[in-house]
Image (cartoon, grey):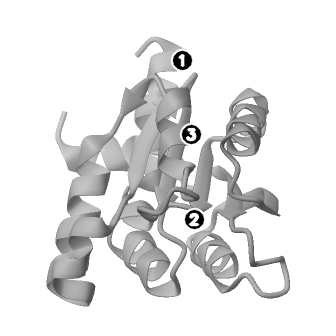
């Protein structure tokens, strides 16, 4: 089956959770979380839950597991906490939870960041995607530019295709 055929079989809408990871932002100042929500809603997807949490590995893991276990969630999107400072632990938390990593997401995100946005600083850019129990997880840096790039070029174009593949597993197709 071709990629086009796969995409035609994909659901038209998926159920999402958006989690902003930050020690300094709240729901009123969270431009990146709102940007994610705007892209998702404009594409016809549903936001089942949105929250801003502290950059603490245990808390991040708890929120990921909560979303994975929720029957109303197909995709969890996080932004923030992906830098290289000791305090940035989102990537480590996500990798400790997922069963399968989708390495192309981080690779393509860095390539696009390099060519379209930040040049050689892209080498410090950390982004990861993976799956756990039929739920997709995408984690991006917290800057609005990074979120915009990831949503426009990678996540929105493929989110339903990813969910289709995960549902195929559940349905035994």
Front residue of 95/77: it is: 95
Front residue of 58/76: it is: 58
* 58 relative position to 166: left or right: right
* 35 relative position to 126: left or right: right
Classify the position of the N terminus by image quarter.
Answer: top left
* 122 relative position to 156: left or right: left
Mark 1–mark 2 distance (CA, rounded to whole Å): 27 Å
- SS category of the residue bearing label 2: strand
Residue, disc 2: 79
Q: How many marks?
A: 3
Residue, disc 3: 93
- Name which quarter of the figure residue 54 lies in: bottom right
Classify the position of the C terminus by image quarter.
Answer: top left
Circles 1 and 2, Cβ within 8 Å, touching? The answer is no
Q: Residues within 10 Å of mark 2 (few under 14, many from 20)?
A: many
Q: For residue 56, say whether it is visible.
A: yes
Residue, disc 1: 170
Q: Position of residue 47 (x, y in %)?
A: 75, 61
Q: Residues within 10 Å of mark 1 (few under 14, many from 20)?
A: few
Give the label, 1 or 2, closer to the camera: 2
């Amino acid at each position: 089956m071709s990629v086009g055929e796969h995409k035609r079989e994909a659901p038209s809408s998926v159920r999402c959770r958006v989690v902003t990871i930050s020690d300094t932002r709240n729901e009123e100042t969270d431009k990146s979380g709102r940007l994610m929500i705007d892209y998702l809603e404009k594409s016809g997807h549903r936001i089942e839950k949105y929250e801003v949490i502290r950059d603490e590995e245990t808390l991040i893991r708890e929120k990921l597991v909560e979303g994975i276990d929720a029957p109303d969630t197909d995709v969890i999107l996080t932004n923030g906490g992906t830098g290289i400072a000791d305090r940035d632990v989102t990537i480590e938390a996500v990798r400790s939870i997922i069963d399968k990593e989708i390495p192309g997401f981080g690779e393509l995100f860095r390539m696009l960041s390099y060519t379209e946005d930040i040049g050689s600083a892209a080498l410090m850019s950390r982004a990861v995607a993976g799956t756990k129990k039929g739920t997709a997880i995408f984690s991006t840096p917290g800057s609005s530019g990074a979120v915009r790039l990831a949503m426009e070029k990678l996540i929105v174009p493929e989110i339903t295709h990813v969910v289709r593949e995960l549902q195929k597993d559940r349905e035994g197709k």
